[in-house]
Structure formats: structure tokens, C-alpha cells
Image: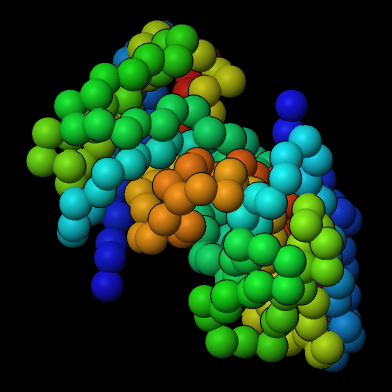
Amino acid sequence: SQTIHQWPATLVQPVGSPLSLECTVEGTSNPNLYWYRQAAGRGLQLLFYSVGIGQISSEVPQNLSASRPQDRQFILSSKKLLLSDSGFYLCAWSEGRGGQPQHFGDGTRLSIL
Amino acid sequence: GQQLNQSPQSMFIQEGEDVSMNCTSSSIFNTWLWYKQDPGEGPVLLIALYKAGELTSNGRLTAQFGITRKDSFLNISASIPSDVGIYFCAGPVTGNQFYFGTGTSLTVIP
């Protein structure tokens, strides 16, 4: 069966520091991969999605970036974090063919001080 | 742009009661998804609907794909404390992306 792993579960970072959140999927090939941000327990905002290695679509302009160095690995990064980057970050995957449900990881709670 | 409106925003019910929530969109969907999110965790897929009029159950949960294809309903029968959480609907923007509703927060009072 397929599994998705996100880490770390919790992160506290100072303003201006870099960020790297990692997500990996097991048990499937060529999945679609997604990064979402959720503020205050509501409203999933799509940040990035990828349909293949090296292919990244950005939905929201900001100081975050994403990369997909391997088929089942998706990384969310920032060079300099802002206070507004605080939130709950969720990685998700779906089967490569269109219209398939997304399956989420357990999320990373990011607090910026 | 596309909007998914969920109602109610929050519900406080007694254990054992039935729950009903819905989701409406401004355009036609060919897929509806329902998720539940426990505090501090990622959303978990409950039910997926692919056909107008479809009625699908998952234990005490039942979801329906509205005939107009612009709405969907989720019902929970005989609620229990572990039903607490936020329930999200989702519908496709494109083949690879989904819009998510703003969520219905459910509190079950023992």
C-alpha cells in the first residue's frame, strides 16, 4: 500500500532563516505531488504541485520554492523565512492520471519567531 | 474564481445525533471528495463521488453527488466523540488540482 511521510512534524525557526521541508511517497510510481499551507485549521491553500521530476507549478507568488529531485520526493524551501510563513504545511500525493483523490501526510507545524 | 461554500461552518451536537452538512460550487464538477481532518493531522479521504446522483456510504457516513453537479452532501449517523474534527469537501479545478471548501467544524458533546 502507499504511504506518505513528511518531516519534521514541528519546526520553530527565526525570521530570516532558511527552510527545508521534505516529503516522500512509497508504494507508487510517478505520482502527482502537492504542497499546501493551512492557516488556523481551515482553508487549504495550494502552493505548488508537480506531475513529474523537475516539473513544478507554482500557484501563489511568495518567498517559497519547491523541488522534485526524485520521482517520489518533494521538497519545500525558503531562503529567508517571513513571519507570515507560519502555518501548517501539508504534502499530498495522487495517482498520475487526472481527477484522482489526493492523500495527505501528517503535516509540519511551522512557527516563525 | 471558483468557490466552494461549505455549510454550516461549525456544528455542536449531542452524541448519538445525526449530522448533515453540504458543499456548493459555482460551477459543475465531475468529482466530489469528502475529507476529515483531526487536530494536528492531515486530512483523510472519507468518500469519493464520481457520478451525478451517486450515493455512497462508508460505515456511518453517507455522501451524495447532487443531481445538478454543483453540490454534495455528507451525513453522519449516530455521531460519536471520535467524529470530532473538520470536514472538507473538494472538487477538481483541473485534472491535477482540487479546490477545497472552507470546512465544517464538528464538535460532539458526550
Q: Residue at x 61, y 55 (%)?
A: A32
The foreground one among A106 and B12 is A106
Examine the rendering and report whether any part of residue A3 can be seen: no
Q: Is residue B83 left or right of residue B51?
A: right
Quadrant into which the C terminus of chain A falls: bottom right
Q: How is the image coloured?
A: rainbow
Q: Residue at x 32, y 25 (%)?
A: B63
Please provide percent x and percent y for residue A87.
67, 66
Please provide percent x and percent y for residue A29.
72, 45
To which quarter of the image does residue A39 belong?
bottom right
Please provide percent x and percent y for residue B24.
22, 48
The foreground one among B81 and A67 is A67
Please provide percent x and percent y for residue B102.
40, 54
Q: Residue at x 53, y 80 (%)?
A: A60
Above or below A43: residue A84: below
Above or below B24: residue B87: above
Examine the rendering and report whether any part of residue A79 can be seen: yes
